[in-house]
Each structure stands twice: as structure tokens, then as C-alpha cells.
Amino acid sequence: MTNAPQRAIGIDIGGTGMKAGIVDLLEGTLLSERVRIPTPKGATPPDVLSTAKQLVGLLGPDAEDLPIGVCFPAVVKNGVTLSAANISDEWIGLDADGRFGEALGRDIRFVNDADAAGLAELKFGAARDQPGFTIMTTLGTGIGSAFLFDGKLVPNSELGHLEHKGESIERWASAVARERDDISWSKWAKRLQHFYDRVEALFSPDLIVVGGGVSKNPEKFLPMIETRAPIVTAVHRNNAGIIGAASLILS
């Protein structure tokens, strides 16, 4: 892989914010400041594309001509977005690779946001050289997940859509649900305990990695959760999506 690029842009599109940065693909670190713009209300494709162009512009001249990886809260197959969680239904069935490539004027690699975070931890973080089955979970607007088995990503798992009382469990146990319901960290940890109990009963992972915005404050909830497998914080915390999206350029 002697001709592989050493730098790329990662764009992380979330339910509340869109973030981007220039990534060192050898070290898995940010070479630039992380830039952020709130996700446009409704998150329609034209508005998200316009915001993505703004983000690339904010990265300055160093971002010119760099390849771009994008991660997004949807099931993604062959560059087409097949679902829409916390975003506009207009994304369902959209050729996201093509639309982003046209808007940004360069080749694009597109992936599910939690899968991108998983790739960052697989290549540069907590799951690096980890044998067996690792499950990455991202706790934010929803609950994302990435399945990592013996160094490979198994894409498009959706553990946030496990059912709880007739609806997706992420509506009850996500970080946004804690804020919406105005509950303590300890009460939220009990909800997470229920979620991780379900995950372990179904999949028996060898390692659980916790990412997302709340991974900046693991001491507030993680010690209250008991799992059979080791449960650790993502090394790249809330930058994992950006780093993992950029690393798609190497695949």
C-alpha cells in the first residue's frame, strides 16, 4: 500500500451536529482542529450537502483535494442509504456516494456512523489486535453499534433498534433520552444495564467498547454497569466517527 494516501477528511453527520477534521491515516489522529456546525433542522439531503461543503471550507487550504470519508446515521450499502434514523426520510434509497461526490467535487466513501466509530477503534484504538468478537456502542442522539470480529467489520448492525416496550430501545436508553427525561446518571445507568444485558444475552461479545459524546465522562455512569465481557471507553471518544470515516480511504 505504498501509494495509499496519508491524509484524508472525515465528516461525521449526526442527529444534532455535523463534524469534520483532517486525519493522519498512519497514526489515526486529527491533524486539524475539529470543526462543527449544527445539523440543519429536518436534515434533508440538500441542506446536509450544503453544510458538508461549509465544513470542508472551514478546514481551510490544507483540505483541498484530499479524499473524503463520510459517516451517517443510516444503513449504508454500496453507497446507498437504506434507512433514516433521526434524519429526513428523503435519505431512504438515496445514492449518497454520488450526491456527495457531485456536491464536494471528489470521490467519497460512505459508511454508517457507528460502523465508522468501530473502524477507528479497530484500526487505531481499543479494539486493535483484539481477538474474537467486539461490539462497539455509540451513545448519543440514538444508540449505534458496530460488530467487529477478528479484525473485520461486520457492517450495519442496529442494536439501538432492539425492542423495548414496543419501540426502539434507543428512545429510552440513549444519551439524549437521559437529557430529555431529566434523570440522574445512576438512573440512566440502570437503563443502560438493561440494554447491555440484552446485548450480552444475544451475542456474548468478548469486549464491549463505549463511544459517543458521553464517553468524555465515563466516570459518571460506566462504573455502575456490570457486564461479563470487559467494557471500556473508546480511545478516540467522540472523534471516532471522523477518524473511522477518513480511514475508509484505505479500504
Image (cartoon, grey):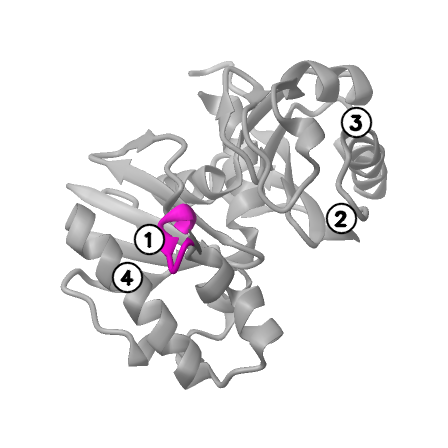
Label 4 and label 1: CA atoms lie apart by 18 Å
Q: Earlier in the sequence, mark 1 or mark 2?
A: 2
Q: Amino acid at mark 1?
A: Ala
205 sits to left or right of 106 = left
What amino acid type is highlighted by mark number 3? Glu
How far is disc 3 from disc 2 in space, using C-alphas? 23 Å
Query: Which of labels 4 and 3 is toward the front?
Result: 4
Range of magenta residues: 160-166
Going from the N terminus, do you reach mark 3 or mark 1 first? 3
Q: Which residue is mark 1?
A: 126
Of callouts 4 and 3, the N-terminal one:
3
Asked if the residue under mark 1 is in contact with the one under mark 4, i.e. CB atoms within 8 Å, the reply is: no
Disc 3 from disc 1: Cα separation: 31 Å
Q: From the top left corner, tell me how far across and down residue 208 is, in percent.
A: 27, 56
Residue at 82 percent across and 39 percent down: it is 51
Label 1, label 2: how far apart the Cα atoms are:
28 Å
**What is the spatial separation of the Cα atoms under label 2 and label 4, in whole angstroms?**
29 Å
Secondary structure beneath dot 1 equals loop
